[in-house]
Image (spheres, rainbow, N blue to C red):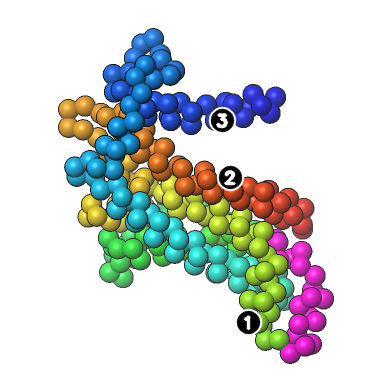
Amino acid sequence: MLIIIGLIFIFPIIWMVLSSLKLNKDVLAIPIKFLPPTWNFKSYYNVFTSQGYDFPRYFLNSVIVAIFAVLINVFLSTIAGYGFAKYKFKGNSFLFIVILSTMMIPFQSIIIPLFVLIKKMGLANSYLGLILPESLSGFCIFLMRQFIKSIPDEVIESARVDGASEFRIFFSIIIPMSKLAIISIIIFHLQWVWNLLIWPLIVITSPEMRTVPLGISLFSGVYFTPYPEQLAAGVSAIAPILLLYIFLSRYFQTSINITGLKE
């Protein structure tokens, strides 16, 4: 049963890869041709050398936005999760519920006020305009809080008795012991930032600032749609996230099991 379900999920990816290697006339041919009658590797070359679509620049933009958004999110989510998990202060539970409630708000419902805010800050059509709104996630704070709660209080108290400052405890104990959870939020948040389309579509106006999803959505011909090139761009876009998950999936599954079992 698991093999059948796995094949159902992986079939669209296989179809996309094979169709990106077909000629344009063969992509929508009837009867359907699963394997390319003529192998066309030029579609990948066309994507990265197409006039008016600077896909290498789009990839660079996506890499810059994803790296900085993920790094800021990891730091803020970890330090917030540590505070909620190990510090007892007035309003702890209430503030944590407020953060959890943000997970129920669709991103589309805050786009207009978010754009107005970014516009007034002078960050529209810039890297900061793309990075800052994606630099914190309520789900990542929740995940880090659940994981850090599993770290024994005795470890932290022993460090305090030895004279370690709170910053030393955070950087030398909490972060190393939370490695599994940090890898999980890296995967979660990276795929969210990498695949985001609607926010770059609104905040970006110049072609050189486009990200990969935005570049793919606008990639089309004047009189026809170059399907192999579109699919080749899609394959190139999912490859980094797919490879990242393959290499980190063992840590990801372990951390999810640990955080899922904790109160």
Furthest residue toward bottom: 163
Amino acid type at circle 1 is Phe
Residue at 30% across, 32% down: 42
* Relative image position of residue 223 (x, y in whole percent): 17, 27
Q: Are marks 2 and 3 in contact (CB under 8 Å)?
A: no
Residue at 76% across, 64% down: 150
Residue 46 shown left or right of residue 135 in the figure: left
- Quarter the C terminus occupies: bottom right
Q: Residues within 10 Å of mark 1 (few under 14, many from 20)?
A: few
Q: Which residue is mark 3?
A: 9
Q: Which residue is mark 2?
A: 246
Helix, strand or loop at mark 1: helix
The stretch in magenta equals 146-163
> Mark 2 or mark 3, which is nearer to you?
2
- Quarter the N terminus occupies: top right
Q: Residues within 10 Å of mark 3 (few under 14, many from 20)?
A: few
Please name whichever residue, 129 or 94, is drawn nearer the observer in this view of the structure. 129
* Relative image position of residue 33 (x, y in whole percent): 41, 15
Q: Is residue 184 visible?
A: yes
Mark 2 → mark 3, Cα distance in angstroms: 15 Å
Q: Are marks 2 and 1 in contact (CB under 8 Å)?
A: no
Amino acid type at circle 3 is Phe
> Mark 2 or mark 1, which is nearer to you?
2
Helix, strand or loop at mark 2: helix
Please name whichever residue, 172 or 135, is drawn nearer the observer in this view of the structure. 172
Mark 2 → mark 1, Cα distance in angstroms: 33 Å
Q: Is residue 95 visible?
A: no
Q: Which residue is mark 1?
A: 167
